[in-house]
Amino acid sequence: RLCTMRASGLFVVTVAEPTALTDAYALIKIVSNRVPGLKVKVLTNHIQSEAEGRAAFDRLATATQRFLHLELEYLGAVPEDPTLQLTVRQPDRFKHWKSAGPAAQALQVIVAEQQGLFGCNLGTAEPRREEL
């Protein structure tokens, strides 16, 4: 509860499965009731194609708009990537995740586009100076 009191935005990461989209919707509903006007941005993960990620987002956004009267922003999609899975399983290789494959590349693009989002630098997770 304390986290939502000071939140200026919410990142939701989901996969394209119906149960995951239902969970994402429930999270958005609970948080948006506690923090009206909260900006919600959605990232789809473990997808086979950009179209699959966009379709999952569209289903979530339609339900959220219809029942919560809340607009979502689509951040993008992170593809299924066996290279990243191997990197995560071998911690000594995880420090090189940026060159791991398509998932890492997609995340780099999304992070670069969202710098300064919600008052922090996503590369360091530190607040911006003007916020201190």
Image (cartoon, grey):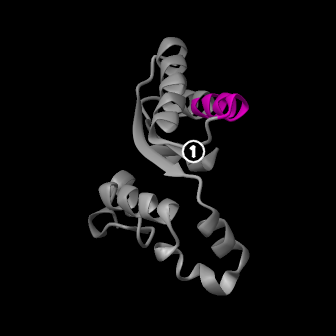
Q: In this view, does 44 lie to the left or right of 131?
A: right
Q: Is mark 1 on a helix, strand or loop?
A: strand
Question: Residue at point 45% right, 23% down?
Answer: 70
Q: Give the range drawn in magenta.
A: 17-28
Please identify the quadrant where the C terminus is shown: bottom left
Reading the image, the residue beneath label 1 is 47
Q: In this view, does 59 lie above or below 121?
A: above
Q: In this view, does 106 lie to the left or right of 17?
A: left
Task: Give the residue at the far top of this rendering.
Answer: 66
Q: Which quarter of the figure is the N terminus placed in?
A: top right
Choose top left, top right, bottom left or bottom right for residue 115.
bottom left
Compared with 126, 111 (above or below) is: above
Q: Main secondary structure of the magenta part?
A: helix
Compared with 132, 78 (above or below) is above
Q: Residue at x 46, y 18 (%)?
A: 65
Q: In which quarter of the image is residue 116?
A: bottom left
Crowd rating for badge 1 (residues with CA inside 10 Å; few <14, some 14–19, many 20+)? many
List x then y, in percent, for residue 49: 50, 42
The quarter holding residue 39 reads: top left
Instruction: Report if residue 23 lies within the magenta region.
Output: yes
**Extreme bottom residue here?**
92
Quick one: which residue is furthest to the left in this view? 130
Q: Can residue 12 be seen in this view?
A: no
Relative to the observer, which residue lies in front, 49 or 119?
A: 49
How many numbered circles are shown?
A: 1
Report the front residue among 22 and 76: 76
Res 88 visible: yes
- Where residue 109 sits: x, y (%)? 36, 59
* Amino acid type, mark 1: Ile
Q: Which residue is drawn at 53% across and 23% down?
A: 59
Q: Is residue 43 magenta?
A: no
Q: Where is residue 100 in the image (x, y as percent from the top left)?
A: 52, 72
